[in-house]
């Protein structure tokens, strides 16, 4: 783990994947900014008000740092990234349905920062459900951002997820929500309740 900024008292934790979550790493472009998911900086700026942000990628730390620098995530004045994690923080598990694979155990973060983060105040966005197999109640499967050139003008995922993060920020226990139904949840919050 590479700690970049101090954990903040009273903030929830947002853990983010990179590949296909924040960035289309398979398409080619002259400028990496062309492969950045739309509204990334707006999303991180708004999330930072209520959440500490940790980036966790299944690649090497060097790649994580390079990508985050290229996307200007580490130098943005409107938010700070708390920490970076790479594949070395992942563990190998075996399941009947998926066989042997690596996953991202949030318990590692909770053990490192028990004063700040726990299962009740943590949510993780990843395009692969298996990455949070150890903590399914804390994971939200984000729609993968692929074919950046085709989808850049229409991808609204981070706009919608910003609304969701703000809607759940006041809750005491993020474990009690079914994150699979996040889109229905924000629709419900938007609709005024009838008296």
Image (cartoon, grey):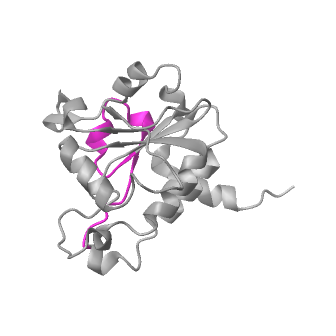
Q: Residue at x 47, y 62 (%)?
A: 41
Residue 146 is left or right of residue 140, and the answer is left
Q: Residue at x 17, y 65 (%)?
A: 26
Q: Residue at x 38, y 55 (%)?
A: 142
Q: Quadrant of the C terminus?
A: bottom right
Q: Residue furthest right?
A: 195
Was residue 39 drawn as part of the magenta stretch in this picture?
Answer: no
Q: In x, y percent, where is residue 84?
A: 33, 40
Image quadrant assignment for residue 38: bottom left
Q: Position of residue 106 (x, y in %)?
A: 37, 30
Q: What residue is shown at x 45% (from left), y 37% (from top)? A: 5
Residue 35 sits in quarter: bottom left
Towards the viewer: 12 or 79: 79
Residue 166, above or below 7: below
* Residues drawn in magenta: 125-147
Q: Is residue 10 visible?
A: yes
Q: Position of residue 13 (x, y in %)?
A: 49, 37
């Amino acid at each position: 783990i590479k700690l970049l900024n101090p954990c903040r008292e009273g903030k929830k934790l947002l853990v983010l994947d990179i590949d296909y979550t924040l960035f289309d790493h398979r398409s080619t472009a002259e400028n990496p900014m062309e492969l950045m998911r739309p509204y990334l900086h707006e999303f991180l700026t708004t999330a930072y008000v209520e959440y500490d942000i940790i980036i966790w990628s299944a690649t090497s730390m060097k790649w994580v740092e390079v990508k985050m620098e290229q996307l200007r995530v580490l130098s943005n004045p409107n938010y700070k990234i708390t920490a970076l994690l790479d594949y070395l923080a992942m563990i190998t598990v075996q399941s009947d349905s998926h066989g042997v694979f690596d996953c991202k155990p949030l318990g590692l973060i909770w053990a490192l920062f028990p004063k700040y983060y726990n299962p009740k105040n943590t949510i993780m966005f990843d395009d692969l459900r298996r990455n949070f197999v150890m903590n399914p109640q804390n994971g939200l499967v984000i729609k993968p951002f692929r074919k950046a050139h085709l989808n850049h003008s229409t991808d609204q995922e981070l706009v919608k997820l910003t609304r969701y993060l703000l809607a759940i920020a006041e809750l005491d226990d993020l474990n009690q929500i079914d994150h699979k139904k996040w889109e229905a949840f924000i629709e419900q919050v938007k609709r005024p309740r009838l008296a």
